[in-house]
Structure formats: structure tokens, C-alpha cells
Image: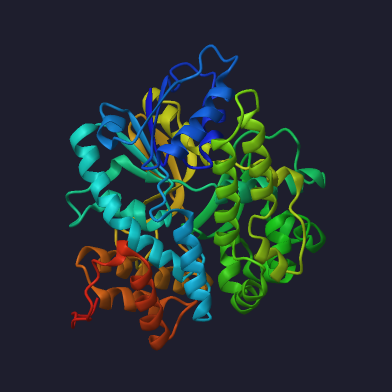
Amino acid sequence: MKLTLLGGGGFRVPLVFKALLADEREGGVSELRLHDVDEARLAAITRVLRELADGHPHAPVVTATTDLGAALEGTDFVFSAMRVGGTAGRASDERICLGHDIIGQETVGAGGISYALRGIPVALDLVEQVRRHAPEAWVINFTNPAGIITQVLRDGTNGTNGLGDRVVGICDSPVGLARRVLSTLQGAGLVSSEVGRVRLDYLGLNHLGWLRGLHVDGDDVLPLLLARPDLIETFEEGRLFGADLIRALGAVPNEYLHYYYFGRENLATEHAAEAPRGKFLLGQQARFYEGMAHLSDDASAFELWNAVRLEREQTYMATNREAAGSFERDEADLATGGYDQVALAIMHAIAHDEPAELILNVANRGTIAGLADHDVIEAPCRVDASGITPLPIDDLWPHARGLVANAKYVENQTIAAALEPSRTAAELALLHHPLVANWNTAKAVLDDLVAEFDELSYLPADGTPRRAH
């Protein structure tokens, strides 16, 4: 199989490559094409991959290019991990939003709207390039905000000129959550260390979902956890949310819901932080890529990368953990990855008919009542050679319906803002975002974001009346 990775100079690319090296199944990826707009970053990551491939006689052949057409030509799968505006853009989003006393996180916060408005035009160009150079390719989207970008790649500009069902979005959060819950139960002796089939009752949107059941060999074992407050607060999400909230919900929330359930605490912690996450990563990655540029020939590129990776994982969601009372991440949670295994499972399922059940970002098609069929949601799916099919699942529980409906309205207004284009739609998206929820703030923060980013210059200077959506 030929795999094209967009954002090929990104820091997390070696995680994907390590998964490819470990994949000993027949018919794996034989050629990996890295595409990025930054040649220096491409060169740095290519060197890390070259070192990882040493000693692996069947390692995929790696090519790196800044030519998108060449990267896509005849490829079988496209893994999109683009970051329009780079980490510097994320840092600016967070700084501007905090200046207006709102959370600027890149997917859940108002920064996610800014990030999407920058990314949607690039996603639309990708649609055209894939249709031209690789019309039979499948696109696996990891570009954030994953729900919005996946929906744009699927629908295009009018719902008929996108890539349709050959696009699927992935995220590593649901599988990581389920793994931690299962490990907790196994460690307590409540579930056997030897399990067969595991099925997740998980539903919502990307970064906005709930684990409502964990079925092991046909039995739902989540009630065993809910009955033990002492166990709940031994794994990451349990410590984030606390046993009282998790038991009240009857479900374990995705970690990103911490921004909604503990918004005031998170905002206060981010104001007090020495550096918001984006600024921290900007400095860390600058040091890494600068270090790679001056690394001697006999020094290990992988060791430098891995040391930075470990620091990155140790500080992941650090402000949320501080807002929850401060705690360190468990060693098992520093392994990272998850999304790479999901991507591999999708490719093998489709290319070689090796069925898999995964939590994916796909079209709703009646799964969640009240959302349009084309709205992208996050839900359990079966993947095989025939494609991707959502599995039957109970609708959202009452406590989740309003939050999901509102979040999808915000996502759709953000998409409309980019497609029309409409500054008013962008303002409505910000206004209705629960972490903004103020008209004057919505208008002011959008003004500052447009002034900061050349990529947002397409938004009209003045709002025009729009028919209610």
C-alpha cells in the first residue's frame, strides 16, 4: 500500500512510522510519502525516520516533498495531519482568547473556531487535489478540529462535490479512555486479564463524547467501575472529573469535556500558567527543530526526538490536571499513539478485508436524533472491504443532547463562515460557543483574530444580514 502523510514534517510523524515498522501483517504500507510546506521540518523528521528504519529490511520506502500533487499521485491512502498556521498559530489563538478572558484551546475553545476558519480553505483545496491525483484514495483525517475538517472533506462546498464516504476522521481519545478504564478494572481483579472481544458504547462529537458502556465478551463492565468511587479516581479521566460527577452522569466523559464541566477553573488556571499550551509547544518544537538542524552526523536524531516527546506527553493537559487538583500522568499514558493504530486498522480493513470495530468520525445518518444526516459525529463503526458502516447504538442520553446539538450548530456556523464567506456566521459561531457566550466578546475576539492571521482575510469586513439557520 502507498500512504501519503500530509503534515509530514510534524513532530508526531515518527509515531506513525513506528507503527508501520511494527506492522508485520501481509500487505502493509510499502511506500510512505511525506508532504509538508516546510523543507527544514521535512528534513528533520526524515532523518528521525531513517534512523528508526535502520535494521528493518522491510521498512517502507520514505520520500519527502513539498509538491502536493507528487505526494498524492496514485496513492492508496491519505493521512491528513495538517496544521494551518503552525504551532505559532495555536499560540496566537490562545493568547488572543485569554486576552478576552475566554479559553482559546485549539479544538474545544474559541481557538478551535479560528483554527477551523484557517483550515477549511486548505481542506477544500485538498479535496480538489485528491480528486485530480488520487480519485480512488481514502482520506483518513486527523487534522483538527477533526469533526469540522472531516465534514468539509466529505461535503466539499455544496454537499455533492466533496470526497464523500471515502473520508473518515479519527481520534485517539476514545480508545485511550477505554483502555484506561479496562486496565483499571483488570488491575482491581474485576475483569480478567485475558479478554476476547471488547465493544465500546461511546457516542458524541469529536472531543465531545461519553463512554456509556464497556462490553467485554458480551458483558458491560462499566457498572463495576461506577460502583467503586475509589477505583474511579485512580485513572486519568477519573481524577480529572472526580467520582461524584462520573457517577452522577453514569458515564465517563472524554477528557476534553473538562473544559465545559470545569470552565471557570480551567480559565483561572490558564491565566495563572507560566505559558499556555501553544506557547509551550512553540518553544519546545523550535528547540527541537533547531537542534536537529545542528545535530552532528554521529548523534542520535531519534533520542533527541524521543526526549522531547516524553516531555510533551508529561505536560499534556497540564492545566486541566492542575485545575483538578494537580496530579502527574501515569507512566502507561506517556506511551502516546493510538491514532496510528486506528489508521492502520482502517487501512488493513479496507484494503485486505480485515474487519475492525472502531470509534470514528463519520456522517450521522440518523444515529443522533436532531442532527442532519451529513453532520459528522463520533460513533462506533465497522470497517471492512465494503467500507465504513456505523453500528447500531442508543441515542444520546438527555444530559448530552443539548451540549452536542449546540456544539454542532457552532461547527456548522463555522463551516458556513468559511464557505459563504460570512463574518456574521463566524460571530454567531463564537456567540453560541458555551466558552464565549457573549456577543460583544464574540465580535471583539473575531476582530483580533482576523487582524492577526492573513489566512482569515477572506472574511468580509462587515457583517451582512443572513437568513436564520
- Above or below, 233 against 36 in this view is below
Q: How is the image coloured?
A: rainbow
In the displayed structure image, the side of residue 381 where residue 214 appears, left or right: right
Task: Describe residue 401's horizontal placement relative to residue 135 as left or right.
Answer: right
| Residue drawn at 37 percent across, 61 percent down | 116
Task: Confirm whether residue 366 shows in the render.
Answer: no
Q: Quadrant of residue 53?
A: top right
Query: In this view of the protein, which residue sits in the foreground, 189 or 108?
Result: 108
User: Could you tell me residue 208's position as x and y percent?
Assistant: 50, 62
The percent position of residue 157, horizontal first and vertical second, equals: 20, 56
Identified at 43% across, 86% down, the residue is: 438
Q: Quadrant of the C terminus?
A: bottom left
Q: How many marks?
A: 0
Return the residue nearer the eye: 217 or 69. Answer: 69
Where residue 441 sits, quadrant-wise, is bottom left
Question: What residue do we see at 18% from left, 80% from top?
Answer: 467
Q: Residue furthest bottom?
A: 440
As drawn, 278 above or below 180? below
Q: Is residue 42 above or below residue 105?
A: above
Q: Residue at x 22, y 40 (%)?
A: 129
Q: Position of residue 204 (x, y in %)?
A: 47, 60
- The single residue placed furthest to the top in the displayed view is 57
Q: Which quadrant would the N terminus be assigned to in this image?
A: top left
Nearest the eye: 289 or 167: 289
Percent coordinates x, y for residue 141 in the rendering: 39, 45
Confirm whether residue 88 shows in the render: yes
Instruction: Decide if residue 43 is on the left or right side of residue 374.
Output: right
